[in-house]
Image (cartoon, rainbow, N blue to C red):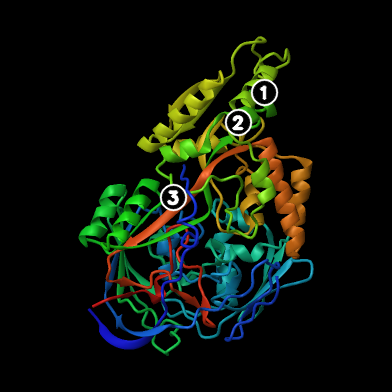
């Protein structure tokens, strides 16, 4: 299985949930220059957190080098091209390294980059790459390779990355290892994009060789080399023997010899496969399975990591569709429900907290002031608002005064989500709302929310109220820019909610590098959402990564310079420093 060597082994870095799990209930539903010892730095917006280095190792343990890890995933991915694929981050970060990466302190650090600097107005971002890094096919990672990635693939018509790439007026090569993104306008959060698909360099030569099937044969610079992929069965990667990183003891990374990823859509099957040892690692965002994994860890059967990030379940409102185009109706829908009860339906009781905004309480962007004004359960208030709307002779739904409000609510046909839909229907029925519930397959559900270009107005959407999932760990500007940009130009704005004040604060957020100023803009937007209710939050989403007892250091990965990584986030991690006990 592998050789045993003495390594300084870091204890598991606690996830966001660890410090607060015993004290809260959980809900589930649908800068400054940061220099490290390697000399790398990134200039990005200031943050309220400081740089946190990896904790000093507390003990020396025998660590196994080698072995095969089998990971069970929720679903398959369509292809692995950073330009075209849906990309499971857990898998993608075995064969792709990012230009930049988020650390455990929330800051973004260079990874494949040696240095990232922005000019004064944040309209130019200059990246200096590490010297000597090669793609798995032996070709060089240099500025020209990055430019070819961008010009020929990432910015191409029809690419999933085209929306982000549209911010870039020009990608300029400055020298062999240095290039600059010249933006259409200043963007304080642009570096955020370099942690994802825009920042995954890939071999241009490999894509030229494979043509349209390039995404079926990914060639990056990562710790593992893509070996084979049998769609819907398994994907195999093997150790990159020439990887550019070593650990703090000078041992070549990664530790594992190979990793196999298997899509196992059934939640219980995936969980039981880890318990039985058929696979070593499984992931879930389903709250009932999170609960089972927590219980299995407590009994000593498995290891389990649980985190709660900014992602949460919600109901989105199409603010161009009567009657939810009227604030009174949206607010009534919010006051009518009891968040905790709906969280319990989803299996999140005792695991996930009620959510009031795009950011969880442990995020530096969280606002208690927003939490305090978010509509709480108040059926009498809901009835009062509905009566005012129903008796308005100019009510937007065109019904006669006094007729009840009718809502169309859609959700995918997952059994838990069907129960959630019924929960909404019951709460809204208690205040006099007639709710038509429908189950819609996931792909159609998303298409209905986005709409199409031939609608009037374009991308109006074909829904009224949908269950949805919102939020991520990105910079607020990255998260909100598309989702609440001008509906005329941003199809991702599925709520069609847009106001001058929202636009003003979005501009402030995107062009300022001062944390206090950016926080003020974020808080103002969150306050507007809480009052105008384009989305109705339920609760945060707990996610778990569970493993057999022989798997170690799943979330203890580091960034060059002995900087702690972000650990396990949103059910993915970075397997460079994971090892298997012999």
For the residue pair 305 and 412, the one nearer the viewer reads as 305
What residue is disc 2 on?
335
User: In the picture provided, is 330 more to the left or to the right than 27?
Assistant: right
Residue 385 has which mark? 1
The percent coordinates of residue 374 (x first, y second) are 64, 40
Give x and y (percent) for residue 135.
45, 76
Q: Are marks 2 and 1 in contact (CB under 8 Å)?
A: yes
Mark 1 Cα shell of 10 Å, populated few (<14), some (14-19), many (≥20): some
Lower position in the chain sequence, tag 3 or tag 2:
2
Q: Which of the 4 image quarters holds residue 345?
A: top left
> Along the line of sight, which residue is nearer the eye, 306 or 122?
306
Is any atom of residue 271 visible in this view? yes
Instruction: Work out whether residue 495 can be spotted.
Output: no
Circle 3 residues within 10 Å: few <14, some 14–19, many ≥20 = many
> Vertically, is 195 above or below 221?
above
What residue is shown at x 42% (from left), y 90% (from top)?
250
Estimate the x, y position of residue 305 in percent, counting from the top left: 39, 62
Residue 547 spot, x, y in % from top left: 31, 63
Q: Foreground residue, 319 or 77?
A: 319
**Which circle marks residue 204 in the picture?**
none
**For the residues bearing labels 3 and 1, Cβ distance under 8 angstroms:** no
Mark 3: secondary structure: loop
The residue mark sitting in front, 3 or 1, is: 3
- Residue 325's image quarter? top right
Q: Earlier in the sequence, mark 2 or mark 1?
A: 2
Disc 3: which residue: 351
């Amino acid at each position: 299985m592998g050789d045993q060597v003495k390594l300084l082994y870091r204890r598991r870095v606690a996830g966001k949930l660890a410090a607060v799990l015993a004290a809260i209930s959980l809900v589930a539903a649908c800068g400054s220059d940061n220099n490290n010892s390697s000399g790398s730095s990134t200039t990005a917006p200031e943050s309220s957190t400081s740089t946190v280095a990896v904790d000093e190792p507390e003990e020396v343990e025998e660590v196994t080098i080698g072995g095969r890890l089998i990971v069970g995933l929720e679903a398959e991915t369509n292809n692995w091209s950073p330009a075209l694929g849906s990309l499971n981050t857990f898998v993608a970060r075995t064969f792709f390294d990012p230009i930049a990466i988020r650390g455990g302190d929330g800051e973004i650090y260079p990874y494949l980059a040696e240095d990232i600097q922005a000019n004064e107005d944040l309209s130019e971002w200059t990246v200096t790459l590490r010297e000597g890094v090669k793609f798995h096919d032996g070709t060089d990672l240099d500025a020209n390779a990055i430019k070819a990635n961008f010009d020929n693939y990432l910015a191409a018509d029809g690419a999933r990355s085209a929306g982000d790439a549209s911010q870039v007026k020009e990608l300029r090569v400055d020298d062999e290892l240095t290039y600059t993104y010249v933006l259409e306008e200043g963007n304080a959060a642009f570096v955020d994009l370099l942690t994802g698909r825009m920042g995954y360099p890939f071999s241009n030569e490999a894509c030229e060789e494979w043509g349209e099937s390039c995404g079926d044969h990914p060639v990056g610079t990562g710790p593992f080399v893509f070996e084979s992929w049998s769609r819907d069965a398994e994907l195999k990667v093997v150790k990159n023997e020439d990887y550019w990183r070593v650990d703090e003891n000078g041992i070549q990374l990664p530790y594992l010899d190979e990793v196999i990823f298997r899509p196992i859509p059934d939640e219980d099957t995936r969980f039981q496969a880890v318990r039985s040892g058929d696979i070593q690692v499984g992931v879930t965002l389903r709250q009932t399975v999170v609960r089972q994994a927590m219980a299995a860890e407590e009994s000593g059967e498995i290891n389990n990591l649980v985190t709660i990030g900014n992602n949460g379940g919600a109901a989105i409102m199409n603010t161009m569709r009567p009657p939810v185009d009227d604030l009174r109706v949206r607010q009534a829908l919010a006051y009518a429900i009891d968040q905790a009860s709906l969280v319990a339906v989803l299996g999140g009781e005792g695991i996930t907290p009620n959510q009031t905004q795009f950011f969880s309480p442990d995020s530096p962007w969280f606002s208690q002031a927003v939490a305090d004004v978010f509509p709480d359960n108040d059926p009498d208030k809901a009835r009062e608002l509905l009566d005012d709307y129903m008796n308005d002779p100019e009510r937007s739904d065109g019904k006669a005064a006094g007729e009840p409000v009718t809502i169309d609510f859609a959700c995918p046909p997952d059994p838990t989500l069907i129960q959630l839909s019924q929960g909404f229907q019951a709460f809204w029925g208690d205040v006099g709302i007639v709710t038509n519930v429908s189950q819609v397959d996931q792909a159609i559900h998303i298409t209905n929310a986005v709409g199409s270009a031939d609608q009037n107005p374009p991308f109006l959407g074909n829904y009224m109220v949908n269950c949805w999932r919102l939020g991520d760990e990105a910079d607020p500007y990255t998260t909100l820019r598309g989702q609440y940009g001008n509906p005329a130009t941003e199809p991702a704005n599925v709520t069609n909610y847009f106001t001058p004040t929202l636009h003003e604060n979005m501009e402030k957020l995107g062009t300022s590098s001062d944390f206090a100023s950016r926080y003020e803009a974020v808080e103002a937007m969150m306050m507007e959402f809480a009052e105008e209710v384009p989305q109705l939050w339920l609760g945060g989403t707990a996610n778990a990564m569970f493993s057999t007892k022989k798997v170690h250091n799943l979330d203890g990965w580091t960034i060059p310079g002995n900087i702690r990584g972000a650990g396990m986030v949103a059910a993915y991690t970075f397997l460079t420093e994971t090892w298997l006990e012999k």
